[in-house]
Image: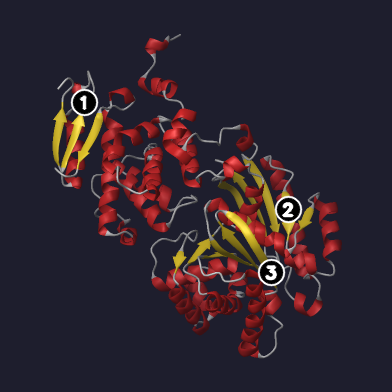
Amino acid sequence: MMDGSDRTGAEKTRADNPPPDAADAEKWGPFGRPLFAGPKAKALARVGVVDVGSNSVRLVVFDGAARSPSYFYNEKVMCGLGQGFTETGRLSEDGKRRALAALRRFQLLAENMGCAPLTAVATAAMREAEDGPAFRREVRETTGIKLWVIDGDEEARLSAQGVLLGWPGAYGLVCDIGGSSMELAELREGRVGKRATAPLGPFRLAGIKGGRKGLTAHIRVELEKLMGAMGPQRDRLFLVGGSWRAIARIDMARRGYPLAVLHEYRMSRDAVMETLAFIAKKDAEDLRAMTGIGEARMALVPTAAIVLAELVRRIEPHDIAVSSYGIREGMLYEQMPEALRARDPLIEACRFAEAKDARLPGFGTLLYDFVAPLFRDVPAERQRILQAACLLHDVSWRSHPDYRHEVGFDYVTRGELGGLRHEERVFLGLALLHRYKNSRSGTRLEALMGLLSAEEVRAAEILGKSMRFGAMLSVAAPERMGALEWHPEKARLTLRLAEGTEALFGEVAAARFQSLASAMGAETKVVQPGA
């Protein structure tokens, strides 16, 4: 048995530097002590929810850091329950058959994954169909799943809460389109405000007479009613729902956008209108070939495009953001305690990743302290990215050494992370690339760097190289890291070595220190202990 003096450096780091406590939370502000390990968060460790919509039936099982969970399991079946509703007032018979089969499967999956009972909600088609109550009883008797039918106001609220899962301080107008209805919800100061709903889903609009002209006139009338209830809404427009995401994917393809992540994808009003005109001129099969969008989804896109064009003209939003988070994420948010809701989803996810995958959990906070003097004047928005980078700086260490830089880059640019704009994804990814690799030229990742300015590319390189130097200077002995000083007026980077650490500043450490200084355009100075 080893006593304390025999502990390895890694063991010592873990024992002497546990995850931040309340004192550390003061320094890190809202990014302080992680909550995923607390009892209230653990209750959300694996949560299964089902959304029975007019077009699709989906099961999502969340897992991981409660404030920024990963999708442990995600399955969608395009049942088309609301197809033909305008003509019959009833659910589609084929849709009911397919939905019931999907729900039977989902219930068994939930039992296998240990997340039963499922929380299941049904929306417009189920609440309005003549045979909706009978089908709900059949679902309960056959599968054991109780479907909670929610009204349009509640559907709007849950969708808006889904947006808040990704953007805690979000403001603007959330627009969620389904097969049968469209919901609007106002967000102000991180809270859901006014809500409204209208029968503007593509299935519901299928029976409108008068061709495109008659359809457009009908949509305008319905939008006037909606906006009369909502009032002026000229801030950000958040788009939620599969038809909106399909339109965003077409926008990406039309523009040759290099990052295929729909969540937090931003579009200007002009870009959206250009894409909607593009959709109107293109054949559906051509659009499917461009994007890989499924046939059932693409069938709804032309009608949804007309709705979106009229909505954008009517409200003139400041900008438009796509949210992959919606009603299902809103159901998870509903179960969160208020303290958890207020957390930064990015930082919580990074803390969870560090605790799960890093060689030295807890070292990210110490590394941030070490590199922070180089970034004293950056705004709070950038500070959180620096903190996230330090927490993630070593989560790809198990990858082959020749590919760690790419794995680090992919981890954030392709990962399920909330609270992160696309430019921030690329910045963070580039910093992690330089954590493991001195040069970025000649990699498959260069196309994505076009999303950043030359100044941002340089800042990401400096961050990455500072982490590269700091992570290897002392390895598992944080008390021997020394201290960095940055004197911008003199363009001088100083390293003050800690007592007894002279030998740690060997050839490789010196080379990495010089590489950092070169990226900063600085001269170097090394101050020996006692000097």
Q: Are marks 3 and 1 in contact (CB under 8 Å)?
A: no
The residue that label 3 is drawn on is: 197
Mark 1 or mark 2, earlier in chain: 2
Q: In the displayed structure, does residue 406 sit left or right of residue 266?
A: left
Q: In the displayed structure, does residue 346 sit left or right of residue 492?
A: right
Which structural element holds mark 1?
loop
The residue that label 1 is drawn on is: 497
Q: Given the image, on which type of amino acid does mark 3 rest?
A: Thr
Which structural element holds mark 3?
strand
Q: Given the image, on which type of amino acid does mark 1 rest?
A: Leu
Any mark on residue 120, and which?
Answer: 2
The CA distance from mark 2 to mark 3 is: 21 Å
Residues 357 and 400: in front is 357
Residue 201 seen in this snapshot: no
Q: At x 32% / y 61%, what residue is drawn?
A: 447
Quadrant including the C terminus: top left
**Foreground tag (2 vs 3):** 3
Q: Are marks 1 and 2 in contact (CB under 8 Å)?
A: no
Any mark on residue 450, and which?
Answer: none
Work out whether 405 lies above or below 317: above
